Image (cartoon, coloured by chain):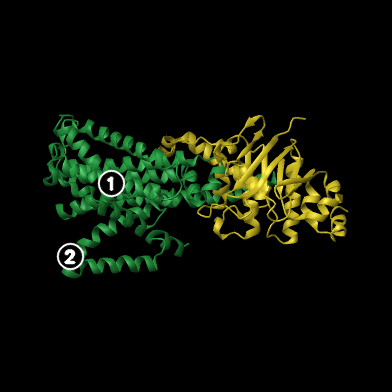
Amino acid sequence: MRAAAIVSEAGAPRRAGRTLPRGGALALLAALLMAIGLFAPNAYVLEVAIVIALNAIVCVALNLLIGYAGQISLGHAGFFALGAYASAILASRWGWPVALAMPAAVAAVALLAWLVGRPTLRLKGHYLAMATLGLGVIISIVLTNEDRFTGGPDGMAVPPLVLFGRTLQGEPTWYALIAIVLWLTVWGALNLIDSPVGRALRALHGSEVAAETCGIDSAKWKLRVFVLSAAAAAAAGTLTAHYAGFLTPAKASFLHSVELVIMVVFGGMASVWGAVVGAAVLTLLPQLLTALKDYEMMAFGAILIATMIFFPRGIVPTLARLFK
Amino acid sequence: MKPLLEVQGLAKRFGGLVVIPDLSFAVPPGSVYAVIGPNGAGKTTLLNLLTGIYRPDRGRVVLDGRELSGQPTHRWAAAGLGRTFQNLQVFFNMSALDNVRTGAHLHERVSMWPALLRLPGLQRAESQGRERAAALMQRVGLGAWIDADADAMPYGALKRLEIARALAGEPKLLLLDEPAAGLNPTEAHEIDGLIRELARGGMTVLLVEHNMRLVMEVSDRVLVLDAGSRLAEGAPAEVARDPRVIEAYLGADAVATGEAAHA
């Protein structure tokens, strides 16, 4: 009896302490996204916000893999671009309705990720990083060279998304859609982390051998989170394609994959909010630094290095620790 | 009685080094079975063979009628094997409570979609799981650490945390790899009490330990390993009197110590 009383005593404040910031932060994100939509002075601001949100969707998903499960993918730009092109090609070359082409493209990328992940994730170590690096490069080459389908380096036009008989166009409409998808992605990621699945993923990162002795099938869960994060990147890719109306293979470049990993590490590994902050800061920073002209890359590099020195865990986790 | 764990003709070598040439033993259910031996006797190798971390070169391990040799570690866990580690394998990226909740992985509904969508059924199970884990922490004497992050806990508490995590899986057989290593005498004595309490509750414990006093006090049977082979096996008092054991393990002049340990 006494033990039960202590349990509920100790358990209650903890639960309140954990769910309040979660709900509060989600409400804050919703308010911020709405405020940007309502008060953006011009279409350019919304355009930047859309790019940030799309990057943030990929980073939140990539962080589930890198930050929580401890597996590195250097091919997420490939999944992103493949999703974009698959949806564009299904819609423009084969006349699929875009609303059907998008989920089909996501499913195709998920299947590809499963095929690549299944043999590599059984191995210990950084085989996934190598395999995804190779896959990303192959995707990039295929998209550039198969110009019958992709238009090659010149790119291809992409038909617009039609939802309920209405063609989605203009920054405000697209911003609204993508902001909702971002919010849902953050919500889903927070849910996942605070669940038996999230604990299994964090356990893999903490100690794989201990995770296995807890009965966690490490290969299975690594594969599942890898497929999930690849599918989310592909979903962001399909949104990008039909929003922009035009695609080039640059989206698939290896450098873009590295950029995505940097956003995750910069914002904070194993932090959903860190991924959002990392995507926002590192999307904005180059825009702000263009004023420096020739010194832009130098300044960018210096800021990255300084951040990693002063915020070794990434921005959000380091700040969270400071205020604890 | 049918043994809970049966090891038959187990052999393991690393390159040219034969760590375990040919080992057989059986652990009866509901007992505390200790494996002792000098450094390098193959104790940790044996534990890693008994949890699927290493694959044996030869031999069988059968737990509760299920042959497990050659299976990956999580299958051994699913078959009812829980363990702790000599050099801690705590999840330092989690809270103490979440460490214990992770230990209950096998008894949770772990699937992607309910988790992503935060379905109400899962939330109910989660809050029950939280309470069970907290109760388990109370039981192993970690009541004060329920809200702590694992990386803020002292060594002695982490040793217990691993035991709580293993117990959360409701194992049939609990393997404890030197649970008293690095603990001061008071803490080590508390581990005694904990193991005895678990045994009273019907848990079968396989204890690998250096601390002779602990082994003599809590074990029902003791297996003495030397160079990976069985040197002696029996009740603690018999083993402690066995001249081969005294010579090989305790040292020729340790007769008095051995007598003191089980007195």
Taking the image as shown, residue A312 lies to the left or right of residue A4, namely left
* Mark 2 residue element: helix
Taking the image as shown, residue A318 lies to the left or right of residue B208, namely left
The reply to whether label 2 and label 1 mark residues of one chain is: yes
Q: Is residue A224 visible?
A: no
* Viewer-nearest of discs 2 and 1: 1
Pointer 2 or 1: first along the chain:
1
Q: At x 37% / y 61%, what residue is drawn?
A: A315
Three-letter amino acid code of the residue under disc 2: Thr
A110 shown above or below B219 = above
- Quadrant showing the N terminus of chain B: top right
Mark 1 Cα-neighbour bin, 10 Å: few <14, some 14–19, many ≥20: many
Taking the image as shown, residue A33 lies to the left or right of residue A19, namely left
The spot of residue B40 in percent (x, y) is 68, 54
A172 shown above or below B145 = above
Q: At x 24% / y 41%, what residue is drawn?
A: A82
Residue annotated with mark 1: A136
The spot of residue A22 in percent (x, y) is 42, 50
Residue annotated with mark 2: A290
* Mark 1 residue element: helix
Three-letter amino acid code of the residue under disc 1: Gly
Query: In this orientation, which residue lies closer to the viewer: A312 or B123?
Result: A312
Judging from the image, what is the letter of the chain drawn in green?
A: A
Q: At x 49% / y 52%, what residue is drawn?
A: A17
Judging from the image, what is the letter of the chain drawn in yellow?
A: B
Q: Is residue B85 visible?
A: yes
The spot of residue B32 in percent (x, y) is 75, 43
Name the chain under label 1. Answer: A
